[in-house]
Amino acid sequence: MLHAVIMAGGTGTRFWPESRDKRPKQLLRLVGDRTMIRATVDRLGELVPSERILVATTAALAGQIAEELSELPGEAILAEPCKRNTAPCIALAAHYVARSDCEATMAVMPADHVISPDETFQAAVRFAAALVEEQPRRIVTFGIRPTYPAESFGYIERGEQLPPLPLGEGRGEGESSQPPPTAVLPAFQVKQFREKPDAKTAKKYLDRGTFYWNSGIFLWKARTILDALAKHQPEMHERIGRIAAASGSPDYDKVLTREFTAIKGISIDYAVMEHATDVVVVEAPFEWDDLGSWQSLARLHGADEQGNTIAAKHLGLNTTGTIIRGGDDHLIVTLGLADCIIVHTADATLVANKHDEESIRKVVELLEKCGWVEYL
């Protein structure tokens, strides 16, 4: 059966001052009237029932996420004692999924992406799940056709195209409880995963036409990813195995803290994807944005005639190319500004050059060094 694992442990530091340790990006309403994680769960629709959804987050956020997703059973919130990147998170989730369903297919996705329309996303996941059922040792990911030479995304270089999967049919082991795919999408063997490029390289990737943005969404059999981690990350696999073995015992919390904290953090791309041999990339038919920074709001909301993206009570003169966000109860006035980011919250205000946006992370580091924890 198909299970969904939603990764929701990030901090979203580039969205400071709205994103904070106790209320990070996935719990903010940055697009529309729903939090990012609420929209992610809603996007699954009837594709995956609530009893087969697992949300992996940190212990500090578990309570808020459980409250936000009150329809999920308590055991659906998998609380990690600390952040250790995506590979340990996925490994722990895979153990839990495999324990309840030894033949499970996992759809793994971040909690902070903007994807639409929901129906197209669901159809794409069904198609990807059918590719996994066709070859149970296969790993499938979604590639986003690039629209500009982005330096902030990882890339996937595609290889040979797969023969089409017959529409409405399932092969291999099959999954009788899961509807068959209703669409046939372009799918290719992955030639190579590439890290975030510089501007010149990103332009080359765009011009070549054989590169996709890496969406960070994966489908695989739970046992396949566990076997891959055992092969390529044996120490991590052993520690996660000890945690899983202690599940339900009085010592679980102690074992979880001891073993998970001792794991060296590593991304799933480095841990597995760079070594895997049967990886397929499906060209995503849905609209996608990873909402990685304040500038992404301009892509999603558009801009006025002066190139400004306004989500606030604002009065501006000679203001161009600027992103402004604040509440309806606070007036923001700008005079003679160009290419800025202004974000106002109840206790902190950010004013930044739009082209120096990456430095917002440094601001968070400096606040920590200064001991101003009330702003973190």
Image (cartoon, rainbow, N blue to C red):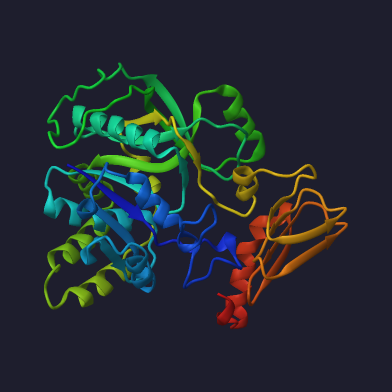
Q: Work out whether residue 151 or residue 64 is closer to the camera in this orientation and state it.
A: 64
Residue 44: which quarter of the image? top left
Seen in the image, is 213 located left or right of residue 136? Answer: right
Q: Quadrant of the N terminus?
A: top left
Q: Is residue 193 visible?
A: yes
Task: Please tell me which residue is depicted at 82% across the width and 61% down the height of the picture.
Answer: 334
Residue 89: which quarter of the image? bottom left
Q: Is residue 278 visible?
A: no
**230 w.r.t. 124: above or below:** below
Seen in the image, is 296 located left or right of residue 332? Answer: left
Residue 108: give x, y in percent of width and height.
32, 47
Residue 183: give x, y in percent of width and height.
33, 24
Task: Please tell me which residue is depicted at 17% across the width and 44% down the height of the picture.
Answer: 104
**129 w.r.t. 223: above or below:** above
**154 w.r.t. 190: above or below:** below
Q: Work out whether residue 282 or residue 311 is closer to the camera in this orientation and state it.
A: 311
